[in-house]
Amino acid sequence: MEITLDPPRPLAAETEDFSVVLGGPLYQLLRRARLSDNALTLVHRRIIAGALVTWLPLLVLSAWEGRAWWGDVQVPFLLNIEVHARFLLGLPLLIFAELGVHLRMRPVVAQFFARDLVHEADRPRFTAAIDSAKRLRNSLTAELGLLVFIFGVGIPVRNYIAVDASTWATGSAAGGAGFANLSLAGWWQALVSVPIFQFLLLRWYFRLFIWTRLLWQVSRIELKLVPTHPDRVGGLGFLGNIVYAFTPVLLAHGVVLAGMIADRIFFAGAALPQFTLEIAAVVGALVILVLFPLMVFAGQLSRARRKGLGEYGLLAQRYVREFDAKWVRGGSDPAEPLMGSADIQSLADLANSFEVIKTMRFAPFSKETVFQLGVITVSPMVPLLLTMISLEELLKRLLSAVF
């Protein structure tokens, strides 16, 4: 039997170029500076520019002040793991994540129309939600608000390496750190390097807020969910793919946290087990932060499951009664063979459909997704295990766990 599929409906123009990262004043500035284009490529230029502005001046100034390598401080610049992790690994990861999120998000949003999940009457509401998200994404006020928060509401003076030792940034023990005690390199870090990193980080939180808000508005629209869809989320399984685009953001957090812990281990005599609760809390919070936008569909998926169980339960009741009457109670034609009967296969198919509905999830992601994101976030901490056991012993334990 030939199966024909209806041609996909044309996508609304409003969704064709939607991306939570493709816009905003900084994006326009980067375009004019030839550090980006309309598709957010030229990532290498932005990463190099970020390092030249945030990390290189710290190296030059600390070297000029004689604090790049030992000198008169306990924590010289080149041995400060946190600063390298933040500006040479964390910052590039935050920049690189933009391209991945952009490439994955555009087709994901368009899938709502391509899969005919939105009723014709509700399409204006859907496109209105997209327009609202784009206005918020492009808001000059929002990005200025992030800067005000960083320089005004945030703590203007902070211990950049929270260890009780003299550092390249402060020149004395961290307990007496303050603006008056900052070195030239410390001033650059306080007024340029750290604010740039914080801005990029906060902008990612803001983008996740926009994504959450958009999906929440879409979840207020009654979608055409199919409870028997094999993805077990009514046809919304495609949304689960977008979370993996945020893995560089999770890695950036993990890298910076690993750098902070490393400095405390090497310069303050701490041990890795002391940070178990902090690591667990950070990893859990970050995984929730990335997955929370998809949880807004829980109510609609729950209703689809209840409705599906009721409808397919009634259908199953009718079918099994007729099957029982025909094959068990002797209602079938004696000449009709039992072996190879389509009735038995239909009964099995109906049971499978009912099982799919029973096992529907309330969010478009699985337990495996949660585990994978957690492992990705915590992976930068793995090298710190070498502060507790030897590399040989670590490899033996990893191999024994695998094999």
Image (spheres, rainbow, N blue to C red):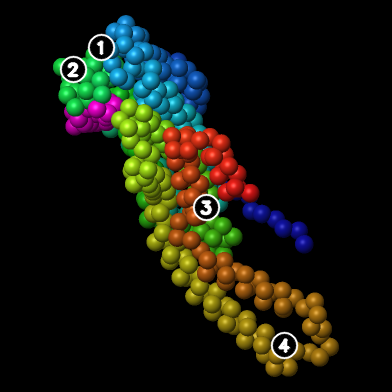
For mark 3, does the 10 Å Cα neighbourhood hold few (<14), some (14 to 19), or many (20 or more) residues?
few
Q: What whole-number distance in Å separates the C-alpha atoms at marks 3 and 1?
A: 48 Å
Residue at which label 2 appears: 181
User: Does dot 4 land on a helix, a strand or a loop?
Assistant: helix
Residue at which label 3 appears: 368
Count every numbered label the image shows and give the total: 4
Taking 143 as reference, is 354 left or right? Answer: right
Query: 175 or 242, which is in the foreground?
Result: 175
Taking 334 as reference, is 310 left or right? Answer: left
Taking 164 as reference, is 247 left or right? Answer: right
User: Who comes first in sequence, dot 3 or dot 1?
Assistant: 1
Q: What whole-number distance in Å separates the C-alpha atoms at marks 4 and 3?
A: 43 Å
Residue at which label 1 appears: 184
Query: 46 or 124, which is in the foreground?
Result: 46
For mark 2, does the 10 Å Cα neighbourhood hold few (<14), some (14 to 19), or many (20 or more) residues?
some
Nearer to us: label 4 or label 1: 1
> Where does the magenta region start and end?
143-164
The type of residue carrying mark 1 is: Leu
Q: Quadrant of residue 355?
A: bottom right
